[in-house]
Structure formats: C-alpha cells, structure tokens
Image (cartoon, coloured by chain):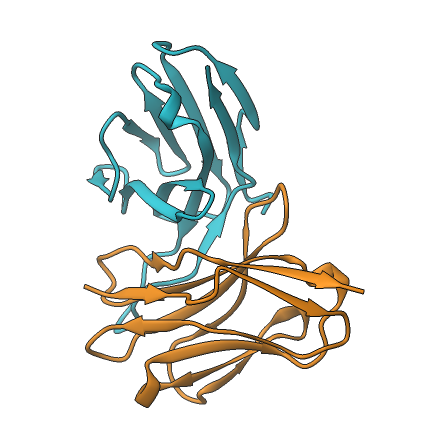
Chain colours: A cyan, B orange
Amino acid sequence: DADVTQTPRNRITKTGKRIMLECSQTKGHDRMYWYRQDPGLGLRLIYYSFDVKDINKGEISDGYSVSRQAQAKFSLSLESAIPNQTALYFCATSDTPSGALGNQPQHFGDGTRLSIL
Amino acid sequence: AQSVTQPDIHITVSEGASLELRCNYSYGATPYLFWYVQSPGQGLQLLLKYFSGDTLVQGIKGFEAEFKRSQSSFNLRKPSVHWSDAAEYFCAVGAVSNTPLVFGKGTRLSVIA
C-alpha cells in the first residue's frame, strides 16, 4: 500500500547497534501500529498509537521503543539490536472508529526486512 | 480478550480447484472480522471484512467469507483458485474500538498445476 511507506526496506546491521525504522502515511489516519513477523508466529504487535500523544505497549515491546513525531509519522527503535530481533517489520494504520463502530481495517506498508548479525 | 485461530498452517490445492481456509475466533459479542492476503515481499492487503448484516461477504479477487456465529467461524472461500493466489492468508478479529486487531498465525497457500 503506497499510502504507508516504510524505510528502509532492507537493513543488515551488527549486534549492539541502534536501529531506527521509520513509517510515514498519507492516509490521514490517527492510529498507527508496529508489528514483527516471524515464520510460524504470524504477526505480533510491538507498539501502537491511537493519536499523537498516545503510545501503548503491545505483546512484545521489550527491547523496542517508539516515537510518534506527528500524525503521519511513527518510528520504531531498537536501542541495542540483538540477533533474535531479526525479522520482517510492518507498520500499519487505521482510521478512528466513529459512533458505535468498532475496529476499522488496518492498512499495511510493504515491510522492512531487518537482519542482525 | 478476543483471539483467533487458523488451524491450517499450510494448504496445497490444484489450480482450478475450490478453496476454503478456516478461521475460528473467540469473543463474547459480535466481532469485527477481516481476511488479509500477503504476497511474497509485500505487506498485507485487505481481502474482505465483516462488521454486521449479511453473513456472506464478498471481497476482492473473487474471494468470499461466511460468518457463522454458532460455530465462531469466518471461513474464506474461492470457487476456483488461480496460481496467483499462492500467498499467506491471515484472519483477524476486532472487538471494542480501543483495542487493536488480533491476527491469526496465518495459512500458507500453495497452488500446483
């Protein structure tokens, strides 16, 4: 989905390095999410943000931090990368429900493939 | 909290055959249900969604899914599979609006000639 852009698309780095993955969106959505995908484990939620001033931990937040710099930007950082953080990382966005509606569909970027040696 | 199970890790079908991918959810009220497809090297794309109303929903690429409350299921179907349908498929369930969607672990579909 070109409306959700992740950079870089691929990154190889060494253990102990600080890494930042960036996500920007042009969909005008308030809600943004970071997931990691590992074979056989599906998508696991790392952090999510429902608006600029809101940050929430997901299922697997240890070793990660995030920054919501603006409505359109949500960055994921690995302060000191370790090999088991090698994975495919996805950013997603969704609209805020209105009225009695529940969750809205999420829209995904194309992912960042991160390898930590 | 809601949860979702995709019982099949990997399915292989012949091109032109019909397809059904299973999804079971756990949630006490009427859920919001989604199916996504992930082609190699790409992000997840929404195939279809169920919010309320008609329990048979049509999606893109010729897919449909049926919500069955009595079975807590939302199975994805396609009458005739094409080689380009080979991908990974994810079912997701949503509940109240202040919690993110919960995704299943995915089913990988292989299509053989």
Taking A29 as reference, is B56 above or below it? below
**Which residue of the protein is positioned furthest toward the right in this rendering?**
B113
A65 sits left or right of B83 in the view: left
Taking B108 as reference, is B62 above or below it? below
Give whichever of A97, B1 is nearer the camera: B1
B106 sits left or right of B87 in the view: left
* Residue A16 visible from this viewpoint: yes
Point out residue A40 in the picture as x, y percentages from the top left corner. Answer: 44, 48
B96 sits left or right of A114 in the view: left
Residue at figure coordinates x 55%, y 44% from the top left: A3
A43 sits left or right of B109 in the view: left
Point out residue A4 in the picture as x, y percentages from the top left corner. Answer: 52, 41
Residue at figure coordinates x 42%, y 72% from the top left: B23
Residue at figure coordinates x 22%, y 30% from the top left: A62
Identify the image quadrant of residue B52: bottom left
Point out residue B60 in the picture as x, y percentages from the top left corner. Answer: 63, 70
Identify the image quadrant of residue A89: top left
Taking A81 as reference, is A54 above or below it? below
Residue at figure coordinates x 54%, y 36% from the top left: A5
Point out residue B111 in the picture as x, y percentages from the top left corner. Answer: 71, 63
